[in-house]
Structure formats: structure tokens, C-alpha cells
Image (cartoon, rainbow, N blue to C red):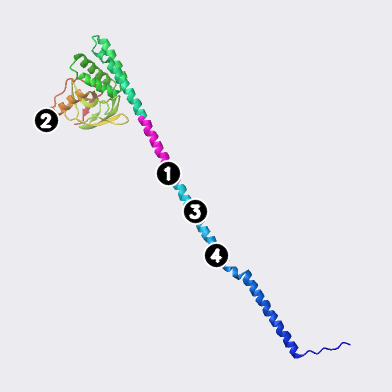
């Protein structure tokens, strides 16, 4: 039979005290471990998050900077290419101008070598040389040359110059589209039509024709880029039916008609012109009549 051990009150209190101390030590150790493992690392996590945010901002700034640089670089490249194209175009134009100048000088040299033929005693040879020179020159150049020859004191050169101008005039073709034949018009009426082949130095004139005379009109046809011309004509002096004509004139004839207009305006007397050298009728509309 086992012997019963009697516990004393003091021993029981000591045991409870030791147990409490063990619990406190365990809590202290746990708290220390939590501090070491977790709580002590909270500042490190905050710094890491802050560093991450800064890295994100820095990445965005770098991205924006690279984008801006790419845009700037593209602008510079495009601007450089534009300048190169402009330079190439300018060089091309300059080369083209040089080629045109060389061709012009070659034409002038050829014409100069044949100018003496224009004074040949053989009339046919003079006219052939004139025709060849006309073919070699641009219209503006031919007009200037023949106009100068027409003013020469040498009679044979005058003849060639005048004939050359006539040939240039003959290259002009045109029409009057309004008014139409036999139309009744007001004292002021619109004229329009088409003209081709008009060269520098030649002018267009409208004139009223009746019988064997004509009266130049102050309103000159204005030719557009599409070769169409228009003019507003005033006529109140024609009795009965009349015609409206389109003339091409050289510089001398244009001056003569302008002088006629000036003198007529000063004197108040508009006498018909019977004939005038240096003009050619291009088109005419007959049977017009002013509405009373």
C-alpha cells in the first residue's frame, strides 16, 4: 500500500510562482521574436515602398524625357531633310537656268551669223533667212528683233522687220463669242471671246466698223490665263447696223490708235480711220444694232 505524500501549502505557492515566471519569460521571448522578425523591419518596408515610388517617378521622367528627345530628334531630321530638298531644288533650278542660258547664247550666236543674209540683194534669200531666224528664236525674242529691225535706217532691214512682225501677227488667232451676229445691243455691251498665239509686243483692240472706216474703242480686251478675253464696249454714235471687230496690232499701230483716241477726246471729233499699217483683223461680228 502506497504511502500518501502530504503536500504543504508553501510548496504549492512556490509552484504557482514558478509557473507564472515561466509564462512571463515565454511571453517576453515571443515578444522579442516578433520584434526581431516583424516589428523591427517595418521601417525597412516603408523605405522600400518609398524607394519603389521614387523609382516609378524616375522611370516616368526618363520615359517622358526619351519621348521628348525622340520628337526633337525627328523634328531635326525632318528639318534637315527639308533643307536638303530645298537645296537640291535650288541647285536643279540653277543648273536648268545655266542650260537655258547656254541654249540662248547658242541661238543668239546662230542668229548673229545669219544677220548679214537679211541684207542680201536676193529678196528670196532674205525672206528665207528671216523665216529661219524666226524659227530659232522664242516669240518674245523674235518680236524684239523684228521690232528693232523695223526701226532701222536701212530700208532692206526695215522691210524684213516689218514682214517679221506681220508674220508674228498672222500667228494670232481669235474669235468673238459675244455679241452674236445681227444682235441688238445696248449702248454699253459686253464683248468676249478667245485668242491664241498673242506674243509680247502685240496688242488686242476692239473697233466698230462701218463702211470703209473703223473707230477704235478705248476698252481694250483683257486676256486671261485660259486665253479668254473680255471687254465692255460703249457705242452711241453708230446709226444703223455696224460690225464689231477684234484687231491685233504691233506697237506702232497701238500707239497710233491710242493717239487717235487722245486727239478725238480733246477735239470731240471722232473721224473714222481708213487704214493703218501694223494691224490685222482677227475676227468680226456683223449686223449689230444699238437699241434706241
Q: Select label 1 or label 4 by which is in front.
A: 4
Residue 240 seen in this snapshot: no
Mark 3 → mark 4, Cα distance in angstroms: 22 Å
Checking the image for residue 76, the label placed there is 1
Dot in front, 2 or 3: 3
Q: Residues within 10 Å of mark 1 (few under 14, many from 20)?
A: few
| SS at circle 2 | helix
Residue beneath label 3, please? Answer: 62
Question: Residue 47, which numbered label?
Answer: 4
Separation of marks 1 and 3 at Cα, in angstroms: 21 Å
232 or 58: nearer the viewer: 58
Q: Residue 274: percent from the left, percent from the top?
A: 17, 20
User: Which of the marked residues, 1 or 3, is nearer the chain's N terminus?
Assistant: 3
Q: Which residue is mark 2?
A: 266
Span of residues in magenta: 73-94
Q: Where is residue 122? Give x, y as percent.
A: 25, 9
C-alpha separation, residue under disc 2 versus residue under disc 1: 68 Å
Q: CA distance from mark 2 to mark 3?
A: 85 Å
Is residue 51 positioned above or below 193 on the image? below
- Where is residue 180, by image quadrant? top left
Image: 182 above or below 52:
above
- Tag 4 or tag 1, which sits nearer the N-term? 4
Residue 172 bears which disc, if any?
Answer: none
Question: If the image is split into quadrants, where does the N terminus sit?
Answer: bottom right
In this rendering, would 154 be left or right of 63? left
Amino acid at each position: 500500500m502506497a504511502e500518501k505524500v502530504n503536500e504543504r501549502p508553501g510548496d504549492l505557492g512556490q509552484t504557482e510562482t514558478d509557473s507564472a515566471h515561466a509564462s512571463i519569460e515565454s511571453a517576453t521571448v515571443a515578444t522579442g521574436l516578433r520584434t526581431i522578425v516583424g516589428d523591427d523591419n517595418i521601417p525597412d518596408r516603408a523605405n522600400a515602398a518609398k524607394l519603389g515610388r521614387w523609382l516609378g517617378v524616375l522611370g516616368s521622367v526618363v520615359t517622358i524625357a526619351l519621348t521628348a528627345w525622340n520628337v526633337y530628334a525627328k523634328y531635326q531630321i525632318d528639318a534637315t531633310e527639308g533643307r536638303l530638298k530645298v537645296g537640291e531644288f535650288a541647285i536643279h533650278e540653277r543648273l536648268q537656268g545655266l542650260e537655258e542660258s547656254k541654249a540662248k547664247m547658242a541661238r543668239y550666236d546662230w542668229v548673229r551669223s545669219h544677220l548679214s543674209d537679211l541684207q542680201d540683194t536676193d529678196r528670196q534669200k532674205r525672206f528665207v533667212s528671216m523665216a529661219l531666224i524666226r524659227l530659232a528664236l522664242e516669240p518674245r525674242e523674235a518680236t524684239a528683233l523684228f521690232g528693232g529691225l523695223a526701226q532701222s535706217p536701212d530700208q532692206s532691214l526695215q522691210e524684213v522687220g516689218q514682214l517679221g512682225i506681220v508674220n508674228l501677227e498672222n500667228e494670232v488667232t481669235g474669235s468673238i463669242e459675244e455679241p452674236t451676229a445681227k444682235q441688238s445691243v445696248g449702248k454699253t455691251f459686253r464683248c468676249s471671246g478667245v485668242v491664241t498665239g498673242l506674243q509680247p509686243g502685240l496688242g488686242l483692240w476692239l473697233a466698230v466698223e462701218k463702211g470703209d472706216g473703223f473707230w477704235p474703242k478705248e476698252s481694250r480686251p483683257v486676256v486671261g490665263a485660259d486665253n479668254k478675253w473680255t471687254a465692255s464696249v460703249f457705242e452711241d454714235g453708230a446709226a444703223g447696223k455696224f460690225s464689231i471687230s477684234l484687231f491685233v496690232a504691233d506697237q506702232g499701230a497701238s500707239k497710233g490708235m491710242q493717239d487717235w483716241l487722245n486727239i478725238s477726246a480733246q477735239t470731240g471729233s471722232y473721224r473714222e480711220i481708213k487704214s493703218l499699217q501694223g494691224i490685222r483683223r482677227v475676227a468680226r461680228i456683223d449686223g449689230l444694232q444699238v437699241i434706241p
